[in-house]
Image (cartoon, rainbow, N blue to C red):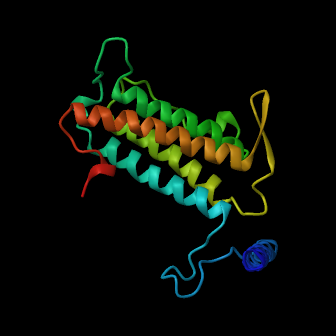
Amino acid sequence: MQRVRVICATAILAGLVTTGAAMAQAHAGTPPTAPAGSGQANVPTGPAAEVQHYYAGVKANILKSATEMPDDAYPFKPEPDIRTFARVVNHVTEAQLRSCGAVNHTAAADLFKVPAETADKATILEALKASFAECDKAYASATDTNLAEMFTLGKASRSRVGLLWGNASHDNEQYATLALYMRLKGLTPPSSEK
């Protein structure tokens, strides 16, 4: 029993030392990095890096889905009362501009204008890419020390991490819809490609 207590105390102490070192690096403005010998040297770790990594993955899947879906499939919807593929892409664009625009303090009037879902694929893709450009700035601004910063979004107050995780999670939900539409059209979604 005594040996178990010593092992537990050592593990707790090691965790505190590691956490303290990571926090000291964060406060010094240097993001913590993966341990030497892990094969990931100089790769930032920590909460900001986690949300940036998650966003980058879902961004790649959405952009590839929107690019690979044929032009004539943008009006496709599986059932009459369900959104078109174009509408889902535009929904991602709208949500990203709203959330990331709030993080960037971009006035609504200065945000890219979302086209109608009946616009051509090139126009819809241009707006999507503009929304990702707005989000790229927002995610790049995230550090482990500013994640708790509060922003006003409509009538609500949200933290930076809440807005960024919320946006990336929403993007991932919408990607699931885009992937389903691609499968219904006989295409392989990006996350399923080998």
Q: Position of residue 7 (x, y in %)?
A: 72, 78
Left or right of residue 57: residue 147: right
Extreme residue in the bottom direction: 37
| Quadrant including the C terminus | bottom left
Question: Which residue corresponds to the image point at 17% horizontal and 36% vertical from the top-left?
Answer: 186
Question: In the displayed structure, would residue 46 be above or below residue 190?
Answer: below
> Which residue is more in the foreground, 86 or 111?
86
Extreme residue in the left direction: 186
| Quadrant including the N terminus | bottom right
Count of picture labels = 0
Extreme residue in the front direction: 1
Left or right of residue 120: residue 36: right
> Which residue is more in the foreground, 10 or 55?
10
Q: Position of residue 171 (x, y in %)?
A: 50, 41
Question: Which residue corresponds to the image point at 60% horizontal and 56% vertical from the top-left?
Answer: 51
Question: Which residue corresponds to the image point at 76% horizontal and 77% vertical from the top-left?
Answer: 25
Q: Where is residue 43 in the image (x, y as percent from the top left)?
A: 56, 75
Question: In the displayed structure, would residue 116 be above or below residue 186?
Answer: above
Left or right of residue 114: residue 2: right
Image-quadrant location for residue 106: top right
Question: Which residue corresponds to the image point at 35% horizontal and 23% vertical from the top-left?
Answer: 84
> Which residue is more in the foreground, 159 or 21?
21
